[in-house]
Image (cartoon, rainbow, N blue to C red):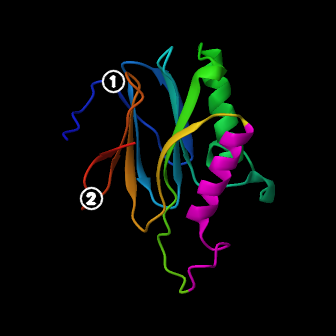
């Protein structure tokens, strides 16, 4: 599978989110322990992509960038999609990332595995918002690039030394 460059490609940085509509393509690089969250309304072809770093904002006093946290970024991105005409009942999600980039010896030490905690909180927030999770490519021990096509909702995952996959 070949991934052609889109002239209307929008980069989503770390601790960032973007919302747009077709024919745009949203791309985020460097998903290690971070999680990329793609929300999509197929009826309006409006989508959003977030690149969160941390699961839960409640442990932090300085929350000047809500895009860092799963519990704040997903609702904010959803709200922006709704303002632009997306329909809440039509929105679905796909996620990627949440890798365990460092070996702590004991794989059962989940408190140190920020990737797993990011995935768990992302799924909880999506469930709380009643947004169905249609696909995921999470875990493992390697980084990913997430490419989100707003023309059809396809999410492509690229990783070094791995085949390109669609979720």
Point 46% across, 39% down: residue: 12
Residue farthest to the left, as pictured: 2
Magenta stretch?
106-128
Please report the residue visible at 53 percent of the width from the left and 56 percent of the height from the top.
34
| Quadrant of the frame with the N terminus | top left
Question: How many neighbours does mark 2 have within 10 angstroms: few (below 14), some (14-19), or many (20 or more)?
Answer: few
Quick one: label 1 or label 2, which is nearer the N terminus?
1
Task: Check residue 55 for magenta coloring.
Answer: no
Give 140 or 73, whichever is nearer the viewer.
140
- Residue 150 visible in the displayed image: yes
Residue at which label 2 appears: 162
Q: What residue would you read off at disc 1? A: 8
Q: At numbered mark 1, what does the secondary structure look like: helix, strand or loop?
A: loop
Instruction: Tell me the mark number nearer the camera, choosing from 1 and 2.
Output: 2
Residue 25 as seen in the image, left or right of residue 67: left
Q: Position of residue 116 (x, y in %)?
A: 59, 63
Give the answer, above or below, for where 155 lies relative to 143: above
Whether residue 74 sits left or right of residue 98 in the image: it is right
Circle 2 sits in a helix, a strand or a loop, which is it?
loop
Q: Is residue 69 visible?
A: no
Q: CA distance from mark 1 to mark 2?
A: 26 Å
Instruction: Using residue 44 as the reference point, say whether residue 160 is left or right of it.
Output: left
Q: Is residue 2 above or below residue 42?
A: below
Residue 150 falls in which quadrant of the image?
A: top left
Q: Could you say which disc has been placed on residue 156 in the image?
A: none
Q: Main secondary structure of the magenta part?
A: helix
Task: Identify which residue is drawn at 47% across, 70% down.
Answer: 101
Image location (x, y in percent) of residue 152: 38, 24
């Amino acid at each position: 599978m070949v991934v052609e460059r889109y002239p209307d490609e929008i980069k989503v940085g770390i601790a960032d989110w973007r919302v747009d509509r077709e024919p745009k393509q949203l791309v985020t690089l460097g998903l290690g322990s971070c999680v990329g969250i793609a929300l999509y309304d197929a009826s309006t072809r409006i989508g959003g992509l977030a690149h969160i770093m941390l699961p839960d904002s409640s442990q932090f006093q300085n929350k000047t960038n809500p895009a860092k946290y799963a519990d704040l970024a997903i609702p904010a991105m959803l709200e922006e999609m709704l303002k632009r005409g997306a329909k809440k009942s039509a929105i679905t999600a796909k996620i990627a990332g949440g890798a365990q980039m460092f070996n702590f010896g004991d794989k059962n030490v989940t408190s140190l595995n920020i990737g797993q905690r990011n995935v768990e909180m992302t799924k909880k927030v999506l469930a709380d918002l009643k947004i169905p999770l249609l696909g995921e490519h999470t875990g493992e021990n390697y980084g990913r690039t997430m490419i989100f096509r707003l023309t059809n909702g396809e999410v492509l995952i690229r990783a070094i030394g791995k085949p390109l996959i669609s979720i």
